[in-house]
Image (cartoon, helix red, strand yellow):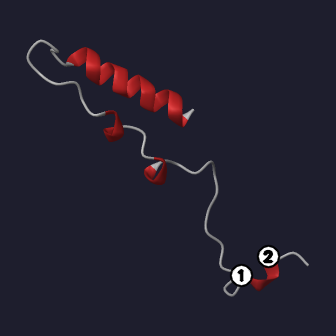
Amino acid sequence: MFKQREHRRERAAVWDTNLTYDEPPVSRAFGNPWLSEKDGKQWFDPKRHPKEMRK
C-alpha cells in the first residue's frame, strides 16, 4: 500500500509540472521507507515490561 500511494503521489507531481519549462521532480523525493508507517509494528522494551515477554 505504501508503494502504491507514493507512486500515485509521484505521478500526480509529474502531471502538475509543466515539463516544457521545468524539470520533473526527483523520484527519490517520494517513497522514503524509513519515514513510512510500519504496519503496526512498534518498539518494545523487555526491561520495562517483563511480564509481556513470552517464555
Residue at (64, 57) in percent of width and height: 41
Instruction: Provide residue 10's location: percent of width, then percent of height.
Output: 35, 27
Q: Which residue is mark 1?
A: 46
Q: Taking 11 as reference, is 44 left or right?
A: right
Quick check: 10 above or below 43? above
Instruction: Provide residue 25's location: percent of width, then percent of height.
Output: 24, 30
Amino acid at pointer 2:
Glu
Out of 52 and 5, give the one closest to the viewer: 5
Q: Are marks 2 and 1 in contact (CB under 8 Å)?
A: yes
Q: Taking 32 as reference, is 52 left or right?
A: right
View extreme (bottom): residue: 47
Quick check: 33 above or below 21? below
Image quarter of the N terminus:
top right
Between label 2 and label 1, give the one nearer the viewer: 1
Instruction: Provide residue 37's location: percent of width, then percent of height.
Output: 52, 48
Amino acid at pointer 1:
Pro
Out of 22 and 40, give the one closest to the viewer: 22
Q: Which residue is mark 2?
A: 52
